Image (cartoon, helix red, strand yellow):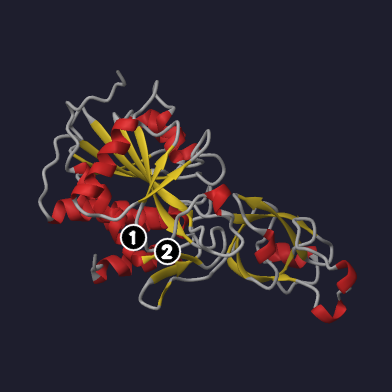
Amino acid sequence: MKFEKKSIKFLENYLNTSSPTGYEHRGQKVWMDYIRPYVDKIEVDHYGTCYGIINPQAQFKVVIEAHADEISWYVNYITDDGLIYVIRNGGSDQTIAPSKIVHIHGEKGIIKGVFGWPAIHTRNSQNEPAPKIENIFIDCGATSKKEVEEMGVFVGCMITYPDEFFEMNDRYFVCRALDNRIGGFMIAEVARMLRENKKTIPFGLYITNSVQEEVGLYGADMIADTIKPNIAIVTDVTHDTTTPMIEKKKEGDQKCGAGPVVFFAPSVHHTIRELIIDTAKTKQIPFQRAAASRATGTDTDAFAHSNGGVPSALISLPLRYMHTTVEMVSKEDVGNVIKLIYETLLKIQPEMKLKYH
């Protein structure tokens, strides 16, 4: 699948816009502005989950969903000499923090800082310190707590990484927070293709970009109760387990470039999953299989367990280096996830049997 210039421009703008958990509004505005021509209606809930609707009058409702938030840090403590200690907002990895540039979202705007770390010459190799929440710190060039606060930085301010989008070797998209704004991109592209290809669907389609996934699937939990869908198809990322130091016996065998990953899990509905697999086979879309024990850890679980049980399925995108600032996905896989969701939607009928028997 070749991406249109306007699509790549949107992807770059969307990824480069910070969207930390609880503060997704700037990224959501970019996303809504893009999908607006391709939907009949746009809604936003109280906590910032956005959804575009095609056929809002239809009684039968299908959700395609991704999550909009990225991991980040909170200012937790400011020392008397102006250093900042942090706590996580989502699954932020302390091991990658030392020497990273950060943006502190202060009350007077963005303040630049750096995660400091003692020079290698000064460390004792016999007792090498490891980065921990307790010892990583941010230096924003201040010499006192008063000076930090005069900059507009206080406890509770959000901290993000500024690393930006690029394409690598014409094969990969690379950026922080591909988990999971790449999902928001993919469902937006599905909406665009439906409108531009003038496809008619016999149900209401809710293109949903949820907040607060990284801290507990909360946005999906809330919006599932609002929309009350009949079917939900969720897309998120999963690990490329061919990368070093990942154990395939534990994490499964998935890799970038081999296609979308269709999950098997208790929360995944058999009928919807088999419809997706049949679509992939019929349309000759490469796909991979993966299994999740107990829970998928994605918004699929929130939708599946809502409203007395919503038939739900998960299509994941293989990704390298999750929760770092250099997350990587295959451009080919991105195109195939879009195609798989699009083609699956064209097969859904309101009268299809969803109950097990």
Left or right of residue 122, residue 322 in this image: left
The residue depicted at 34 percent of the width and 60 percent of the height is 333
The quadrant of the picture occupied by the C terminus is top left
Badge 2 vs badge 1, beta-carbon distance below 8 Å = yes
Residue 356 rendering spot, x and y as whole percentages: 31, 21
Q: Amino acid at mark 1?
A: Val
The residue depicted at 66 percent of the width and 71 percent of the height is 113
Identify the mark at residue 329; answer none if there is no mark. Answer: 2
Among all residues in the image, which is located at the extreme top? 357
Q: CA distance from mark 2 to mark 1?
A: 7 Å
Q: Amino acid at mark 2?
A: Val
Residue holding disc 1:
334
Indicate the quadrant where residue 99 lies. bottom right
Identify whether 234 is placed above or below 110.
Answer: above
Residue 189 rendering spot, x and y as whole percentages: 26, 56
Residue 46 seen = no
Q: Which circle's residue, 2 or 1, is located before the other in the chain?
A: 2
Q: Nearer the viewer, residue 303 or 87?
A: 303
Identify whether 94 is placed above or below 128.
Answer: above
